[in-house]
Image (cartoon, rainbow, N blue to C red):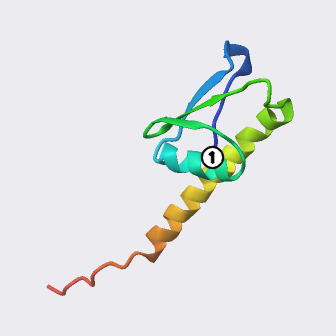
């Protein structure tokens, strides 16, 4: 399954940094913002999320699904683009 994994028992802060290997963090942040989720791209494939008093527990619990959905949309787009590529015909020897 595409997504992120976090062990809540190891989290010591309200700041969560996660990585999106092979997917632009800025593009993920933009898609999440369109869903009302604010995260910050801190590197080409890394994002930072911060909880605060205005973020509800329900919003925190919903975020992994939202991130997974966005990442899947990028994987689906990449697969579609790969399937639509045309390759030159091989010449006979």
- Residue at x-position 69% and y-position 20%: 14
83 in relation to 47, above or below: below
User: Around disc 1, counting alpha carbons within 10 Å, would you say few (fewer than 14), some (14 to 19), or many (20 or more)?
Assistant: few
Q: Secondary structure at mark 1?
A: loop
In this rendering, the answer to whether 75 lies above or below 21 is below
The residue wearing badge 1 is 2
Asked which quadrant contains residue 7, the reply is: top right
For residue 26, side relative to residue 69 (left or right): left
The residue positioned farthest toward the top in the image shown: 12
Estimate the x, y position of residue 89 in percent, counting from the top left.
27, 84
Where residue 61 sits in the image (x, y, percent)? 80, 35
Q: Is residue 39 above or below residue 93?
A: above
Quadrant housing the C terminus = bottom left
Is 6 drawn above or below residue 58 in the view shown?
above
Find the residue positioned furthest to the bottom: 92
Q: Residue at x 73, y 20 (%)?
A: 8
Which residue is more in the foreground, 13 or 1? Answer: 13
What x and y, as percent, mark residue 71? 60, 50
Left or right side of 73 for 44: left
The residue drawn where x is 67% and y is 53% is 34
**52 vs 72, nearest the viewer:** 52
Asked whether 29 or 77 is in front, the reply is: 29
46 on left or right of 14: left
Residue sitting at x 71%, y 39%? 64
Q: How many marks?
A: 1
Residue 53 located left or right of residue 67: right
């Amino acid at each position: 399954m595409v997504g992120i994994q976090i062990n809540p028992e190891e989290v010591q802060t309200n700041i969560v940094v996660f990585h999106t290997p092979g997917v632009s963090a800025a593009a993920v942040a933009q898609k999440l913002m369109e869903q009302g989720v604010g995260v910050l791209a801190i590197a080409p494939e890394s994002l930072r999320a911060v909880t605060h008093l205005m973020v509800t527990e329900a919003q925190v619990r919903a975020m992994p699904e939202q991130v997974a959905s966005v990442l899947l949309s990028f994987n689906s787009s990449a697969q579609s683009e790969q399937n639509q590529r045309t390759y030159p015909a091989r010449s006979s020897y």
